Image (cartoon, rainbow, N blue to C red):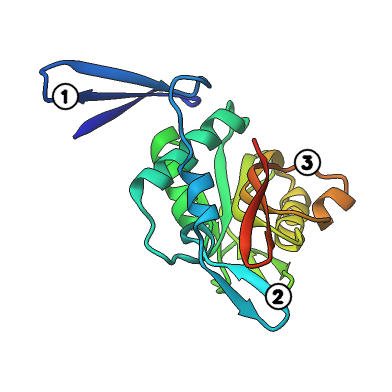
Amino acid sequence: MGIYRRISRTEIVFSAGYPDGTNRQVLFGTPGTETMDQLDRSLVEAPIIQKGDYEYFVHPISDGVPMLEPELLREIVIKIIRKAQLENVDKIVTPAAMGIHISTALSLMTDIPLVIIRKRQYGLDGEVALSKQTGYSEDEMYINDVFEGDRVLVLDDVLSTGGTLLGIIEALEHIGAEVVDTVAVIEKAGPNELEEAGHDVKTLITVEVENGEVKIVENS
């Protein structure tokens, strides 16, 4: 067992005792302190299913199955801490449902409060509706607890068409919040609405499915 200790919003120290009696510390937040490739490997090994003419990879970050190993989730959060602009961020904002596990882990490691955008309307004061558009469907979603002047990080599991994230960013800007940074863990290669609208989004890895296999296009 080990202990994580946050020394800033962008630096985490992990302390662990080892069988030889020594105690070692690893500083997360500074590239080069450890080698991590579980995200790459998990995507390359992801099962592929056929949806009509579309080849779809099934991954624990984007689908909740297969089982999500804590080591993979930890690696992803550490990479987000390294990549995202977190200083002076007031809130992490994520859409239900597949952004929740990533954002919860990030919130625990940074002490930044978490706002979940829900498909359910609660009718609370200040609630804002937005239209969620994906490559498959269009739904109404609802934002609570984000206010004018808030500085937010938008976080999601996958960037595909970009419709969901674009709708969220536009709704947050309408509220008067400042979107400090936008991060998606996995990007599916190809054009998306965010780029077309001039919004910058950071991703950890870009992939495409070709001939029944996941291929890594870019690893950042």
Q: Earlier in the sequence, mark 3 or mark 2?
A: 2
102 displayed left or right of 135: left
Q: Please state which amino acid type lies under the numbered disc 1.
A: Tyr
Residue receiving disc 2: 54
Q: Which of the two marks, 3 or 2, is nearer to us in this view?
A: 2
Find numbered disc 3 in the image and state the secondary structure of the residue it sits on: loop
Question: For mark 2, does the 10 Å Cα neighbourhood hold few (<14), some (14 to 19), or many (20 or more) residues?
Answer: few
Residue receiving disc 3: 200
Find numbered disc 2 in the image and state the secondary structure of the residue it sits on: strand
Q: Earlier in the sequence, mark 1 or mark 3?
A: 1
- In the image, 27 versus 168, the foreground residue is 27
Question: For mark 3, does the 10 Å Cα neighbourhood hold few (<14), some (14 to 19), or many (20 or more) residues?
Answer: few
* Quadrant (top left/top right/bottom left/bottom right) for the N terminus: top left
- In the displayed structure, 146 sits above or below 37; it is below
Residue appearing at x 58%, y 33% in the figure: 89
186 displayed left or right of 36: right
51 displayed left or right of 166: left
The answer to which quarter of the image holds residue 177 is top right
Q: Please state which amino acid type lies under the numbered disc 3.
A: Asp
Residue receiving disc 1: 18
* Quadrant (top left/top right/bottom left/bottom right) for the C terminus: top right
Residue appearing at x 77%, y 56% in the figure: 166
Identify the disc placed on residue 118.
none
Q: Please state which amino acid type lies under the numbered disc 2.
A: Tyr
Q: Is residue 15 at all visible to an observer of this figure?
A: yes
Residue appearing at x 63%, y 41% in the figure: 152
Image coordinates for residue 12, horizontal then vertical, percent: 40, 25
Image coordinates for residue 172, horizontal then vertical, percent: 71, 51
- In the displayed structure, 10 sits above or below 120; it is above
Tell me the distance, in whole angstroms, between the alpha carbons under discs 3 and 2: 27 Å
Find numbered disc 1 in the image and state the secondary structure of the residue it sits on: loop
